[in-house]
Amino acid sequence: MNLTMIKKDFSRNKAINITLLLFIVLSACLISVGTMIVIQLFGAIDSMYEIAKPPHFMQMHTGEINWEELNDFAESVDYVESWQVIEMVNIYGGNIRITKPDGKYYVMSDSLLDIGFVKQNDKYDLLLDTNNTPIYPSKGEIGVPIILLDSYDIKIGDTLTITEGDYSKDFTVTSYVRDSQMNSTLCSSTRFLINEEEHDEIKNRIGKIEYLIEFYFPDESLASKFQTTYEKAGMPANGQPITYAIIRLVSGISDIIMVLIIVLVSLFLIFVVAICLRFTILTAMEEEIKSIGTMRAIGMSYKNISQIYLIKYRFLAILGCIAGYALSLVINKYFTSHIAETFGPPKLTLAAMLAPIATVCLVYLFEIYFCKKIIKKIKRITIVEALRSGADRSKANASRVAKFINLSKFKSLPVDILMAVQDVAVKARAWLLLFFVILIAIGIMVVPVNLHNTFKSPKFITYMGQSQSDIVVSLAKSENIAEKFDEVFDVLNSDSEVEDYNVEAEVVYEAINKDGDWTNIHVDCSDVAKSELQYLEGKAPENENQIALSVLNANEMGVKVGDTLPMLINGQEMSIVVSGIYQDVTSGGFTAKMMRPYDKEAVEGYSFYINVKDGVNIQKKIDLYKNKMGVETEVVSMEEFIDQTLGGVSRQLGKAVVAVIIMSMCLVALIIILFFNLQAAKEYSQVAIMKAIGFSVQDIRKQYLLKVLMVSMIGIVFGTVLANALGEGIVSGILSILGLGISKITFIINPVNAYLLCPIATLIVAVAVTWYSSKAFKRYNIVQLINE
């Protein structure tokens, strides 16, 4: 009997039921995909980590090491299970040449990552191939980090040459390397893998050695405790300390941001499904009010009547959730391709199968609970009220609204427009469904689009601890860094096409952290304060006794604006006032800015931020500078600087944006189909009468199109306003939780995308679907209405 009732209802209301089904499919699919990606992401990371064994705590260090002291310290900590020190030979990208089989070549001088050459370790922190097997290169072979393949065309069989002075050595690319800890563009370094014998050779001939001091514990949660112990013991710490938790977070950050967008959108979609179910059920109850009264009159209980209504929606929810889950299995590969490339193919484990099923079941339970809440309204319907036609009440409601609209005042407007405006005003409550869904659709589309544009914009450099410029020239520390500085200085001063430039020197001072210990702090010193940075509190330094700290550095030092920070500068202890706290995602988020003279002998590197005059071709200028300044100088455009740092995050976010836009367009199309079919049944008599008194089908279709356009445009305006008002707060909260060095973000909006293309695309879909759906008016006629 139940199956027969469902079949009859589906045959009578095909469009409505199919539309509701598709809504449920979309919501279940997205929540399932989001859950599946999270499980597979961390499953793939864990599988890789089981083989690679990244450190639980790592201290990067440049400089001398007292090996005996370090060994004694490690043995004194009872929970240290193992430890090792890796020698990474950092070689400037300008000294690395990639040669193709046809003889063409390029140098890697524009690489923003520190390029390190290492040998394979014995047991821990292993570098893997694309099959997640440890690589052991033979002499003359080299493994290239996978993360560089997005920026550089490096193929198996290419020749990689390192040179410095009269020293040169060739390697053949034989494998791509998966690195368990340096596998994101947000990391400051990346590692090439070479043979042990050749590693011992080059470390004495080229580059600069940086030590990776790594420790392992029974439980990785001991890393924070150990870090405090390590720093208090005064162990080597001229570099960034990194814990297992940070390695894990940075490894998956690009996919995590994508998942968060998908999950947020799916939650909004579940809300839309709830709104649609409410509207559909109430419309059905309104149309069948007399049938409900009859059933109550013959003695049927509320439970029996509610089950008649609920069975259809229960069937739709079950079918939609099953179909949504099945669809998520199909489209999952689109979102997990980056995971497969970086960590290895994610395994479809039992947890990866059951967790999405659990979330889909929650969607089902929520929708059924919501349906039951709405159907409870039947309890409040008396037999007398149900058997009385609701027409008089509808007319009364209409008259109360209609009295505020005087059509005689707008006689100059076309009749179609006047009637459309009046109908929307009189039936405003019915049109609220379309309004809210359009509002949500435009909102969930505009926020990811704005976020993606923000990450891609050159202006995002202000969230990376730098002010905006056209070109960035960088000098790494070397024996002849002073000569190279003078050379760059002369080139820029003699270039008439340079508008202005600013020089920033990176130096390392010491400061007292929140635990009362002296720790290294990397400071960028310049003559001009970076007032364009994204300051959360305070402002840029105004004199040499002030310092601006990044968010994470301020937390590490335990200071706020106006506090005094004890610092050791050039061997002299000073009290420096914190003038401001800014946001920065580079260098792990730990940076600082000062306007203070510095010791040139202690400089770790220089950066020149150059603005050229209007009309100057930036790429040609970059090529010219590369030729003049030599391979030891890194020259990149601001766009390239951002792309190399955030390219991985931006690309994954782009995938989410594409999915959200497609889903939003489907959402708009489905809601109009649903709304039209629900309203069409209620307005059958009105349309038939209009045709009888002389309105053509085209006139009626135009009126309906005008109504949809009017409501859609209002929804787009409100949706855009809400997206701008609430979107930044939501995204800022998420980024703050992730601990990337950003806690408050202001969208950098592309008006064409956000305010033109997205609304136009929405309106085009709305118009096309409305015009197609309104063809049904051709079948409406007064004779059939009278016969009924």
Image (spheres, grey):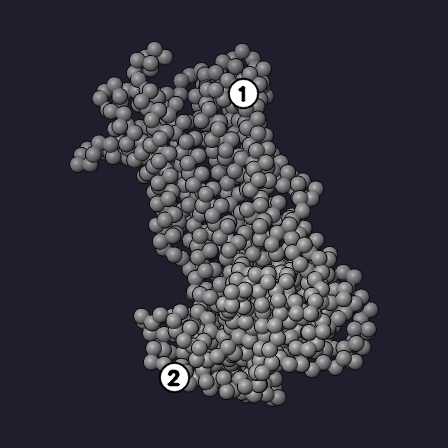
Q: Residue at x 54, y 24 (%)?
A: 312
| Front one among 714 and 63 | 63
Note whether residue 177 is visible. Answer: yes
Disc 2 and disc 1 in contact, CB within 8 angstroms: no
Q: Which residue is mark 1?
A: 6
| Residue 782 numbered tag | none
**Residue type, mark 2 in image:** Asn
| Front one among 671 and 334 | 334
Asked whether, in this view, residue 642 is left or right of residue 131, the answer is left
**Within-10-Å neighbours for mark 2: few <14, some 14–19, many 20+:** few
Task: Residue 554 in the image: state x and y as whole percent.
Answer: 57, 71
Q: Quadrant of the N terminus?
A: top right
Residue 746 against residue 699 in the figure, above or below: below
Number of callouts: 2
Residue 36 against residue 105 in the figure, above or below: above
Q: Residue at x 44, y 65 (%)?
A: 639
Task: Residue 120 in the image: state x and y as whole percent.
Answer: 71, 67
Note whether residue 92 is visible. Answer: no
Q: Which residue is mark 2?
A: 493
Q: Quadrant of the C terminus?
A: top left
Q: Residue at x 33, y 26 (%)?
A: 775
Sequence-first tag of 2 and 1 = 1
Instruction: Locate residue 342: give its quadrant.
Output: bottom right
**Residue type, mark 1 in image:** Ile
Asked whether, in this view, residue 116 is left or right of residue 732, the answer is right
